Image (cartoon, helix red, strand yellow):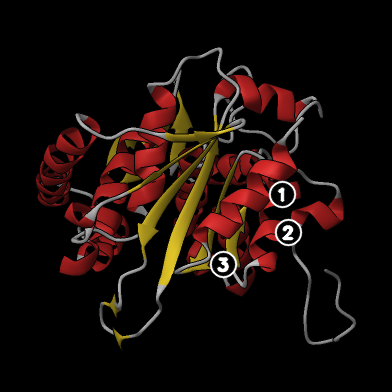
Amino acid sequence: SACDDSNLCLVNPREFEIDGSSECSASSVCALFAQSLGSHNADLLCFGVLGAVGDTHFDSSGELTGVNDLVFQQAKSRNLAAFEDEYLLKVGEQIPALQLKRYVDALGSFGYFNGGPDFAIKGLLEGFDERYIAKADEYTETFESILNHYLSHFELDTAGDCHWFYLDDTFAPFGVKTVGLVAEQIIEASDPASEKYLIGFQDLPSKIPGTGFFEFKEWKLSFRVTPALEEKVRDGARRSLVEVVPNCAEKVGGFVDACHDHAAACTVPHGKEDEFLKHFVSEVRI
């Protein structure tokens, strides 16, 4: 919401009639902000593109639009990015952006408790060579082994137009971004014609690497929608996650940390998950 404090500048794209779900990723905002601090930050423009690609902010032709495209054009003018049927980023060597996204996901999430995020940042800034790729592949192999075992016996819970799942303790070695990555894989494997909201639950770990231990006693929830439902949301025929998640989280004392029309994340206290689901299922019902 807006604020009258002269020391605060509101940069929520929705307040400026910019679609934050397709035209302006958080990474693009950060990249532009970095440019305002000095021209020496021009090398960071490609990470704005990386975030936009990672958030799949593509139009029907597979290209970025709006603020995301503005950042790409600035990166392209500095030979940091290119588009040749797909987006390419120069981080040392030139790497397809979607491939780099997978490497960064692996380091940041699957390697969360083993210095993975710091390793990823170092590689992005200094050149993402074979050392970083090998480490990302190592983490990915471990994760996929656990994920394949999990998917071989798990079942989605269902109520109304909602599916949900809980990650078990085998995922404890990974950061809580993992539940979103699992949700993405479940959506990719789902019936293209289905119109479902998907919610993944992962227990919020008590350890924050480099910071310490905390008694959160909360679930991290990650939300996705199937492609067919995403089309309905864009047409206004079904409710978006922006319309539903904040309200449901507030009712149970939860906290929303990301929210777009078709993807979102929040935390919910232990013991409040059933109440949250009840509210969510009710609010998205046609």
First of labels 1, 3 by sequence position: 3
Q: Is residue 155 above or below residue 29?
A: above
| Residue pointed to by mark 3 | 34
How many marks on residues? 3
Q: Write the residue at 30% across / 77% down.
A: 206
Residue type, numbered disc 1: Val
Dot 2 crowding, Cα within 10 Å, few <14, some 14–19, many 20+: some
The CA span between labels 1 and 2 is 6 Å
Dot 1 crowding, Cα within 10 Å, few <14, some 14–19, many 20+: some
Residue type, numbered disc 3: Ala
The CA span between labels 1 and 3 is 32 Å
Q: Quadrant of residue 262?
A: top right
Left/right placement of residue 111 relative to residue 85 reads left
Dot 3 crowding, Cα within 10 Å, few <14, some 14–19, many 20+: some
The circle on residue 244 is 1
Q: Is residue 176 above or below residue 187?
A: below
The reply to whether callout 1 and callout 2 are in contact (CB within 8 Å) is yes
Left/right placement of residue 240 relative to residue 76 reads right
Which SS class for mark 3? helix
